[in-house]
Image (cartoon, coloured by chain):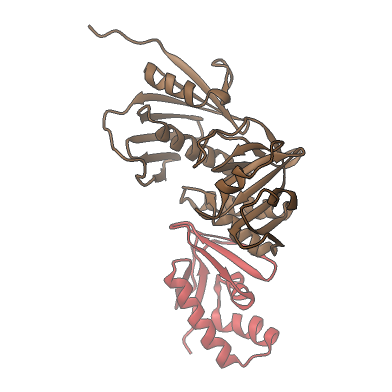
Amino acid sequence: MDPVYIARHPAAAWRRLEDEVIVISASDSSLFTLNEVAAEIWECADGRTPLAEIVAHHIVTRYGVGFDEAYRDARELVEQLAGKGILIVSGEPITGGDGR
Amino acid sequence: MHRESARFRVVINIGGLAIGFVGTDPAIAQSLERRYHAYLASPLAPATCEFTVVRATARVEGDNAGVEITHHDGRWFIRRGSLSAEYDPAAARGSAHLDDRPYNIDSLLRIVHTLLLAREGGFLLHAASAVRDGHALVFTGASGAGKTTICRLAPPDAVLLTDEISYLRPTAHGYTAFGTPFTGELGIPGMPISAPVRAVYLLAHGDRTRIEPMRPAEAVRSVLRHVLFFATEPESVQAVLNAVCQFTRSTPVYRLEFRPEPDVWERI
């Protein structure tokens, strides 16, 4: 499995609210709400931690789902968020994310 | 022979933030003084920022031209129809080309206030608001949700702050709503007073009056959808998101479904 790295886009404003994360794309003011699992992945998107590691440590253990299923869903999610312009996805570690 | 007009200075104080306008065009001075008479400060009053205004030579008809705001080299550039302005926040100075039509001046004021408020944890909200019993009630919602209707149903002891754009900023008394001159369908400027916000209601027409509290995340999303904000600079967008989160932490937000009858005010 090729490593996948994810980083929050610097033009995305966001806040955690209870078990959700609200994200605003600064470029077009679109508003997104991430559910509990998506919020977990979002907060771990530091550009340095491989997605597989995020899924294994934060999703599989916490939510009791199989790795393959969780990883497939996570890949789908990060591609969606990248398509919205609020997440950066790369095969290499990423610098220049929001740095938080 | 060209004769130079006298220089004017008009200071408009909305929400405790005074903006000065200086220029020489008497038509612009008169327009400012007429439209914002309830919000005028002394021409000698200190201002949070000051704009030099000159008459726009190009004229664009229609008041629904889109707003274009860009930010570079530390300055904001604003365009909307025949309004063209730039603002340097570090110097607290700007310049504007505009004509004496009210919506151009309104646009400039609204945009500059959103930029100033973002630094202070405040924001403008598409919402009607009124003061009753010493507290402000804020009614937000999409166009047609009932902002004008709720204002028309207001009892005599409620003082209208605005039927269109609510001005919300933190003060020593918590989040406070201020009157604004920005009018909606009613066409009546709000009174230049302020009061701490007691509650926000997200309006919807219904066949009966029903009030439900909203969960924090839902409240943030609902308020955010109606925040008036133009900048696309990430720091400013983050500041507005933080402000709305802070606001909804300290202010209850309810969904208010209502029948257009006066007793709705007794229920809230």
**x, y (%) of residue B21?**
47, 23
The extreme left residue here reads B1
Measured along the vertical axis of the image, is residue B18 above or below residue B76? Answer: above
Residue B59 in view, yes or no: yes
Measured along the vertical axis of the image, is residue B44 above or below residue B193? Answer: above
Query: Depth check: A70 or B249 in front?
Result: B249
Query: Depth check: B101 or B227 in front?
Result: B101
The residue that appears at 43% across and 32% down in the rendered structure is B105
The quadrant of the rendering that contains the N terminus of chain B is: top left
Residue B170 in view, yes or no: no
**x, y (%) of residue B47?**
56, 24
Measured along the vertical axis of the image, is residue B20 above or below residue B186? Answer: above
* Quadrant assignment, res A91: bottom left
Q: How many marks?
A: 0
Which chain is represented by brown in the image?
A: B
Question: Is residue A9 rendered to the left or right of residue B86?
Answer: right
* Quadrant assignment, res B222: bottom right
Which chain is represented by red in the image?
A: A
Measured along the vertical axis of the image, is residue B120 above or below residue B205? Answer: above
**x, y (%) of residue B240?**
58, 50
Question: Is residue B117 rendered to the left or right of residue A30?
Answer: right
**x, y (%) of residue B195?**
71, 37
The residue that appears at 32% across and 40% down in the rendered structure is B62
